[in-house]
Amino acid sequence: MRITNGLILLRLVALAVAQGSGTYSVKTPPLTTNWTFEVGTNPWPEYPRPQMQRSQWQNLNGIWRYENATSLNATSDPPFSQTLENEVLVPSCLESGLSGIMGSYALYSWFSTSFTVPSSWSGNQILLNFGAVDYEATVYVNGQQAGFNRGGYYQFTVDVTNATKFDEANELLVFVHDPTDSGDYVIPIGKQTLRPSHIFYTPCSGIWQSVWVEPAPANYITALDVNANMDGQVNVTVHSSSGAASPVSVTIYESGGEKAIATTNGTSDSPFQFTVSSTSLWSPDSPTLYNMSISFGSDTVRSYTGFRTISKGEVNGVVRPLLNGEPLFMFGTLDQGFWPDGIYTPPSREAMVYDLDVLKSLGFNMLRKHIKVENDLFYQACDQMGLLLIQDMPALRPLQGDQYLPNADQQAEFTRQLELLVNQHKSYPSIVTWVIYNEGWGQLIDGYPEFGLTDLVNSLDGTRLIDSTTGWFDHGAGDFSDNHHYANPQCGSPFYSIQSSPYDPARIGIQGEFGGIGQNVSIEHLWNNQAAINTINQTYEIDETIDAWNYRGHKLLTELKEQTEIYACSGGVWTQTTDVEGEVNGLLTYDRRVLRTNITQWKDDIQALYDALKSRSSNSTSTMRML
Ligand SMILES: *[C@@H]1O[C@H](CO)[C@@H](O)[C@H](O)[C@H]1NC(C)=O
Ligand SMILES: *[C@@H]1O[C@H](CO)[C@@H](O)[C@H](O)[C@H]1NC(C)=O
Ligand SMILES: *[C@@H]1O[C@H](CO)[C@@H](O)[C@H](O)[C@H]1NC(C)=O
Ligand SMILES: *[C@@H]1O[C@H](CO)[C@@H](O)[C@H](O)[C@H]1NC(C)=O
Ligand SMILES: *[C@@H]1O[C@H](CO)[C@@H](O)[C@H](O)[C@H]1NC(C)=O
Ligand SMILES: *[C@@H]1O[C@H](CO)[C@@H](O)[C@H](O)[C@H]1NC(C)=O
Ligand SMILES: *[C@@H]1O[C@H](CO)[C@@H](O)[C@H](O)[C@H]1NC(C)=O
Ligand SMILES: *[C@@H]1O[C@H](CO)[C@@H](O)[C@H](O)[C@H]1NC(C)=O
Ligand SMILES: *[C@@H]1O[C@H](CO)[C@@H](O)[C@H](O)[C@H]1NC(C)=O
Ligand SMILES: *[C@@H]1O[C@H](CO)[C@@H](O)[C@H](O)[C@H]1NC(C)=O
Ligand SMILES: *[C@@H]1O[C@H](CO)[C@@H](O)[C@H](O)[C@H]1NC(C)=O
């Protein structure tokens, strides 16, 4: 090095010392999006729970501190009143560039911040809410353990009233344990793995959804179940912290306005019904929603609903899904919800909605949220935009040889989390179907547990269809006969392949996955990680040009249309919305900067699917039998 560079070097060293090594900045990930450097330090400012909004709240998202830990033993001596090593962005995955850490093997971690609540909140319960923490969180406030939660995809609330001081800083410390697929852990993880390869991706660890604090009266609303159907009937359950039946009042407002159109009185902690006349129905073409407010003692929350009914019926001899009593073809993408800069956490609401806008503008009426659960604003966006959702349960790790099927305890935990999935999401109008198992992952064959789980889901939510097993091991449970096949579909057809079952005419024929055709792109749109790049040629099919890719897309959608015209196909799931890491088969590249689709062609081909089902379902001698 020449002597003149010495000064520059000294200056750089001085700068590094002044900033401190743990100071937050975005780490540049292997691929960025347009939003990566726009996130800033106040991410996700929106109220995080649109179906149960309280007016007073404080967002705790932003810069926290973080330190890696070495084992579960760390909780025997929590680092109270200490400055943890690094700054970190909350919410984020520790593995993401946006976290500022971009770490790996984040199995054990400490997070800390402080919050101040105003004395005007005193006399209330102080509720600390987490959108989701992957996988286990132990929460401490001012040196006291205040709560524990297990499950990487679910909301939880910790009542921190007794530990909280007003008008002064409260120390919040969270220990996170996220085993993912280390050792012989068998837990719901979806596509996350510590050893990413092709269709298995970088994991997410830590506080990956919003954190906020709010006051509530002594007896407060803990959850709200709302279902509104095509006959204007609303079924509400208001769950309260005391669990004791108390009076509650529900008001529904005109759509897009402030005028009350129905008010009813009921009782908390058990379902009650009332009817609203002349409501507009919710559907993908006309996603009308209605605001609600719920008063319970001195607690008031705002919510919303949409009026629609999901059912099934035999139409001209074929079992079809029905929306508001009409048969419809459900056509969507396999939607993984991964981001190159945020992994599980979209960089912002705008970025998240961008994907949905692209799908909607191509004419998709559905998406299959694939073995992941999103934040509540995602479901609200689907409700607002009119996108049907097939919601998967996050899968256990796939079978490798004969290892990693769940033991009895692991199966019980899977079941508990399946209940959480349904109970926490059953008020979104957009969700039309629950999926229990994907392609046999973690699916025990002894005794076929999908039958019992299907009954369980149906008992928690009898208003939707259930796709018990999407792909592979179908023993007859649930409402769908669901084939997976790449690249071409085999939907409700008298031909099928190894791993699938013959079409069962007693259930709805659907192509739960097909397509998956790939098209390699230049390095600036690829997840720039050599191991991932090396797996690109594991894609089911690579098309050398975008024209060839569109040509193949047209052929495959035409096959699906013919299977709708000739056989008994009622829906399909195209793999997939975006590229993810070493998988280059998206409509969009992973950075969302290239849309591969010829828009006119895809819109026409997708419309042809809807038309094919419609013409099969209605003619002068049509018959329909509700099932
Ligand atoms: C955790 O603590 C137990 C009991 O003190 C000890 O046996 C074990 O070795 C510790 N584990 C680690 C990883 O430090
Ligand atoms: C945490 O520590 C483990 C070793 O204990 C290491 O393998 C891992 O890379 C570290 N992770 C992060 C995010 O610092
Ligand atoms: C707070 O303290 C009161 C009185 O000791 C106790 O009854 C209550 O259960 C505590 N609340 C919580 C959430 O721990
Ligand atoms: C209302 O919803 C509850 C579950 O939340 C269900 O058990 C009950 O059967 C429903 N009642 C009607 C009339 O739909
Ligand atoms: C619900 O209320 C919010 C806030 O007042 C308003 O912005 C929104 O348009 C309303 N939505 C509907 C569907 O009425
Ligand atoms: C609901 O109850 C409140 C007070 O408990 C009463 O003023 C109101 O008239 C009731 N509304 C209806 C629709 O019954
Ligand atoms: C019209 O409906 C009848 C009775 O359901 C059915 O048998 C026939 O195949 C239908 N025709 C067409 C063209 O779909
Ligand atoms: C895909 O493209 C990248 C760079 O653009 C290249 O390194 C890689 O070899 C290509 N892979 C295949 C299977 O074409
Ligand atoms: C796939 O790519 C890898 C690395 O780029 C190469 O070694 C391998 O031969 C390729 N396989 C096929 C089937 O093309
Ligand atoms: C990203 O930014 C470029 C340059 O401003 C713009 O042309 C493109 O439309 C943007 N893409 C997305 C997905 O916002
Ligand atoms: C897109 O597809 C349409 C046919 O659907 C075709 O007419 C048009 O030329 C295609 N556009 C491009 C850019 O290939």
Image: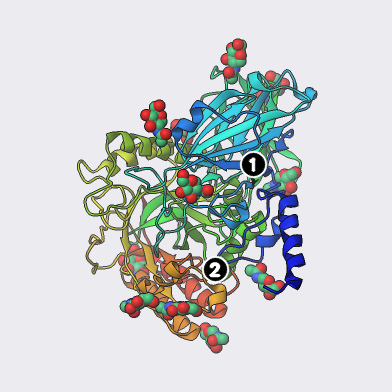
Give the quadrant of residue 239: top right
C-alpha distance separating marks 2 and 1: 44 Å
User: Where does the image place residue 380, in percent across and percent down from the top left?
Assistant: 60, 49
User: Where does the image place residue 318, in percent across and percent down from the top left?
Assistant: 32, 60
Q: Residue at x 48, y 65 (%)?
A: 580
Q: Residue 331 vs residue 47: left or right?
A: left
- Seen as rendered, the residue at the extreme left is 446
User: Where does the image place residue 286, in percent across and percent down from the top left?
Assistant: 61, 57
- Disc 2 target residue: 363
**In this view, 389 is above or below 409:** below
Mark in the foreground, 2 or 1:
1
| Residue nearest the viewer, comparing 8 with 534 | 8
Q: Residue at x 23, y 62 (%)?
A: 502
- Is residue 314 among the parts visible in the rendering? yes
Q: Residue 472 vs residue 575: left or right?
A: left
- Seen as rendered, the residue at the extreme front is 3
In the rendering, which numbered label is found on residue 1?
A: none
Circle 1 sits in a helix, a strand or a loop, which is it?
strand
Which amino acid does the dot numbered 1 rest on?
Arg
Which amino acid does the dot numbered 2 rest on?
Gly
- Disc 1 target residue: 65
Q: Earlier in the sequence, mark 2 or mark 1?
A: 1
Tag 2 and tag 1, C-beta contact below 8 Å: no
How crowded is the residue under tag 1: few (<14 C-alpha within 10 Å), some, or many (20+)? many
**In this view, 362 is above or below 15:** below
| Residue nearest the viewer, comparing 202 with 246 | 202
- Is residue 300 among the parts visible in the rendering? no
